[in-house]
Amino acid sequence: MNPYSSLADDFYVNMTLNTEMQLPAGRETILGFFERVQKKYPTMRNFYTRENGDFVLEEDKDLGHQRWVTLEPRRICSGQINPDDVDGAVEQHSLILDLVPFMLSVSPLDCEALDYLMGFDFPYRGNHDELVTEALGVSSALDGMLQIPGIKVLNYEPTMTIALDDSCRRQARVMIETRTNAYQVRRGDFQEEPISVFFTVRQYGSLESDMSYVSTFHQLRTIAEQLLEEHVIDQVLRPLQQAISTK
């Protein structure tokens, strides 16, 4: 059971591994890697190359709970949209991280950054930035600007990054992304697009000698879920959900 599905219209759990060195690009290596992933998840049958050279393997987009994996020159990404449960998505990401040292020659020394991301989308037809301002408020230092007669909020995307250790190598970030532009506000003509909340816990730098990508990723997950419960759900997600429901 996904405990986060009731918090937003769409929810996703992603993993990103950024590497210091270029990833292998040989045909045999790339196809061998994706074939191994497909063996575990046979419904991931759509394989293609983007115009920029990235390789993609994904499920059909109309399933409503799509799995996907991409290989870029220095980045490996894995995601699942609307997973039935978080453990299922984590299992997918763990498989990828278990494979990359052997199939793509990505040593723990080669880690530039490893991310555990939880994302939430709230479709809304209206001024996204105005709604975020209303739902979350602004600091007292900026509140006076909202009192100027006739103003319209054009951009308000709160973000904060915190260090979780003294070395600043482990960090957490909450970021809100809006999709309203000045043209829409000027005309009062809005499309229904998502307001997105991204919550990421990131590990920077090469891994400790006794740590693997999988074990580190599970640590990031534990931290992310704890911080989300204590500092994001009631403080960010539910206020946005409630503000939209009243419109």
Image (cartoon, rainbow, N blue to C red):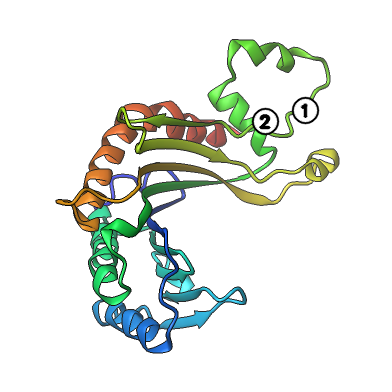
Quadrant assignment, res 238? top left
Q: Amino acid at mark 1?
A: Lys
Residue ranking furthest to the left: 210
Q: Is residue 134 above or below residue 36?
A: above
Question: Position of 8 compared to 205: left or right?
Answer: right
Residue occupied by mark 1:
152
Query: Helix, strand, or loop for circle 2?
Result: helix
Q: Position of residue 91 (x, y in %)?
A: 23, 62
Q: Could you tell which of marks 2 and 1 lies nearer the N-terminus?
A: 2
Q: Is residue 100 above or below residue 191?
A: below
Query: Helix, strand, or loop for circle 1?
Result: loop
Residue ranking furthest to the bottom: 28
Q: Decide: marks 2, 1 in contact (CB < 8 A)?
A: yes
Distance, label 2 to label 1, CA atoms, is 7 Å
Question: Position of 184 compared to 9: left or right?
Answer: right
Question: Position of 157 compared to 33: left or right?
Answer: right
Work out whether residue 133 or residue 37 is closer to the camera in this orientation and state it: 37
Total marks in image: 2
Q: Is residue 93 above or below residue 103?
A: above
Q: Position of residue 123 (x, y in %)?
A: 57, 48
Residue visible at 45% across and 46% down in the picture: 120
Residue visible at 36% across and 83% down in the picture: 29
Q: Is residue 16 above or below residue 157?
A: below
Quadrant assignment, res 51? bottom right
Work out whether residue 204 or residue 94 is closer to the camera in this orientation and state it: 204
Q: Quadrant of the C terminus?
A: top right
Q: Amino acid at mark 2?
A: Glu
Q: Residues within 10 Å of mark 2 (few under 14, many from 20)?
A: some
Residue visible at 33% across and 32% down in the picture: 167
Q: Position of residue 72 (x, y in %)?
A: 48, 69
Q: Position of residue 131 (x, y in %)?
A: 62, 32
Residue occupied by mark 2:
130
